Image (cartoon, rainbow, N blue to C red):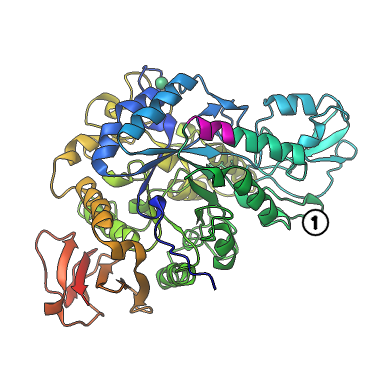
């Protein structure tokens, strides 16, 4: 077998920061974050130590799904700025050694994209076959497939007497990847962004592009990897990019294809197997259940061990679709918020893969519990209507929503304790979390024991200690109901991570000759007795081999 050094890529040695542009920093008082706002905060990100920014979509869009419905892939939405602003952002970031990762939404576009406007004019329009159509009669759907954001996955267009297929909202028609002309358009667009200096691409729901609706196949269609390899050959392989595929349906086996070290597809996958462990089995995310902690360890362990030396993973607790981790699996009370946020960060940043920090996570930002009228997210609003109609009580729906709404992650960034958290001088597009007076960047930047400083230390540690990048992962105390512990080992070092995931003190199940282990980092004010773990205590030790 060919011997490949799998740890020599820049994106294996860096940390990515995700920005949700409309909620990061407003520069012109319209209440919506924008590119100039991001530029004004680059020094903050440089201080944190990250090497790349994943920018959620900023291309032209009617904003039906906050930019995940693109109407022009080669222009910036005026709400965020202009192409000039984008070029300035890329250049300013570059000066700080930060690359910009564009969010490519390739499974679908907006129904206001010119391709779709043309496509629905007639069946022989050259763009008609850019989308997925089925004949039929109005009112009789081709099949019973449902769209993620509610309703049938089919929408009738009287002009052509056909239904088009949409996996998400009606305003997000699916692109027909089986049409080579569509693929060519996409590759040319990617090359154009590479030419503009994009440092990489995050590919939205990429496992769903090769759909076969007649067989009700959405994820992992038969031609998926053929298309991905072609795309990679035609585009990514011509540059030194970070490429990350969002794949809800990935298994470690499939991830080895996505992130094959030979570079034939992407740099890494962004998969969610660890994320669904607090919902009722076989139900959806709104059907809440306590976290299955031992299973969480098993799942992370499986990914760590199975991809070692033959693939690469993204490490994340948060993104723009997920609730805030400190509220979800930590403890957001005044007493334990900072401590549990640091513990969760320790577990994640100690593993193998590329860590992602979602904006505000580095401050320990929390979930919100608003009234229904405050929510903006299309998924949240649709779910409220559907569950109300299905007879769920208001209280029950709100409980699910407070726990899992995507708007938990989308409340504006909390920069300081001044009006509107320093996010905007106008009226914010989504209500700011009222706890911004206590939780904000200004408070945390210079404070030695802040969550921010802890993240900064973890990010710096990754650059200092190769074992964090290349070390083999071994889970310890796998069945223990409260402690998350593991080692990372390479030729010279053994790194030991020991964390108490819960709020009760516990005897440490890991037994070592502690005199041999040097404590590198802890979330306690002072080092504690190594044989006992305090609530949410986290420790990283190093031993020379
Ligand atoms: C992805 C995005 C999500 C979006 C969906 C449709 O899951 O992360 O925000 O709504 O794709 O594009
Ligand atoms: Ca603005």
Please name whichever residue, 499 or 327, is drawn nearer the observer in this view of the structure: 499
Percent coordinates x, y for residue 363 in the rendering: 27, 44
Dominant secondary-structure state across the stretch colored magenta = helix
Q: Which residue is mark 1?
A: 215
Count of labels in the image: 1
Q: Per the image, is 125 magenta? A: no
Percent coordinates x, y for residue 148 in the rendering: 64, 46
Left or right position of 189 against 213? left
Residue at the extreme front: 2
Please name whichever residue, 28 or 191, is drawn nearer the observer in this view of the structure: 191
Can residue 328 be spotted in the picture? yes
- The residue shown at (49%, 71%) is 306
Give the quarter of the image for residue 158.
top right
Percent coordinates x, y for residue 362 in the rendering: 29, 46
Can residue 66 be spotted in the picture? no
Left or right position of 417 against 129? left
Quarter of image, ligand 2: top left
Give the quarter of the image for residue 165.
top right
- The residue shown at (72%, 28%) is 115
Q: Per the image, is 195 magenta? A: yes
Highlighted range, magenta: 191-196
Q: Secondary structure at mark 1?
A: helix
Please name whichever residue, 483 or 511, is drawn nearer the observer in this view of the structure: 511
């Amino acid at each position: 077998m060919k011997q490949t050094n799998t740890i020599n890529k820049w994106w294996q040695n860096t940390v990515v920061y995700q920005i949700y542009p409309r909620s990061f920093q407003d520069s012109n008082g319209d209440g919506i974050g924008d590119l100039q706002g991001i530029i004004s905060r680059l020094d903050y990100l440089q201080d944190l130590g990250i090497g790349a920014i994943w920018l959620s979509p900023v291309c032209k869009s009617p904003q039906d799904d906050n930019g995940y419905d693109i109407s022009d892939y080669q222009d910036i939405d005026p709400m965020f700025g202009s192409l000039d602003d984008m070029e300035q952002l890329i250049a300013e970031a570059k000066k700080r050694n930060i690359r910009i990762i564009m969010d490519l939404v390739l499974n679908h576009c907006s129904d206001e994209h010119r391709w779709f406007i043309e496509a629905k004019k007639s069946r022989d329009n050259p763009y008609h076959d850019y989308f997925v159509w089925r004949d039929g009669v109005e009112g009789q759907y081709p099949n019973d497939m449902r769209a993620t954001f509610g309703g049938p996955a089919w929408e009738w267009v009287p002009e052509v007497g056909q239904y088009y297929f949409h996996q998400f909202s009606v305003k997000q028609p699916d692109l027909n990847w089986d049409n080579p002309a569509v693929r060519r358009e996409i590759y040319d667009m990617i090359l154009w962004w590479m030419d503009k200096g994009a440092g990489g691409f995050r590919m939205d729901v990429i496992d769903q592009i090769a759909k076969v609706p007649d067989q009700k196949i959405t994820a992992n269609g038969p031609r998926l990897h053929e298309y991905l390899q072609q795309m990679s050959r035609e585009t990514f392989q011509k540059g030194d990019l970070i490429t990350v595929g969002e794949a809800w349906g990935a298994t470690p086996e499939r991830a080895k294809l996505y992130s094959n070290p030979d570079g034939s597809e992407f740099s890494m996958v962004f998969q969610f197997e660890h994320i669904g462990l607090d919902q009722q089995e076989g139900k959806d995310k709104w059907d809440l259940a306590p976290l299955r902690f031992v299973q969480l360890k098993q799942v992370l362990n499986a990914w760590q061990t199975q991809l070692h030396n033959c693939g690469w993973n993204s490490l994340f607790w948060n993104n723009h679709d997920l609730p805030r981790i400190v509220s979800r699996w930590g403890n957001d009370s005044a007493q334990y918020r900072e401590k549990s946020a640091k513990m969760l960060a320790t577990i994640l940043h100690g593993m193998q893969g590329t860590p992602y920090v979602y904006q505000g996570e580095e401050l320990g930002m929390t979930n919100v519990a608003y009234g229904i009228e405050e929510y903006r997210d299309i998924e949240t609003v649709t779910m409220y209507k559907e569950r109300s109609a299905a007879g769920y009580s208001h209280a029950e729906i709100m409980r699910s929503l407070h726990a899992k709404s995507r708007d938990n992650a989308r409340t504006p960034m909390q920069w300081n304790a001044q009006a509107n958290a320093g996010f905007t001088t106008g009226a914010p597009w989504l209500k700011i979390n009222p706890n911004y007076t206590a939780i904000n960047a200004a408070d945390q930047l210079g404070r030695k024991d802040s969550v921010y400083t802890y993240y900064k230390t973890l990010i710096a540690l990754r650059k200092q200690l190769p074992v964090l990048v290349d070390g083999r992962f071994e889970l310890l105390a796998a069945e223990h109901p409260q402690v998350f512990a593991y080692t990372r080992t390479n030729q010279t070092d053994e790194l030991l991570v020991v964390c108490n995931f819960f709020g009760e003190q516990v005897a440490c199940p890991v037994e070592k000759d502690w005199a041999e282990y040097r404590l590198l980092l802890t979330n306690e004010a002072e080092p504690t007795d190594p044989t006992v773990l305090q609530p949410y205590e986290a420790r990283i030790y190093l031993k020379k081999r």
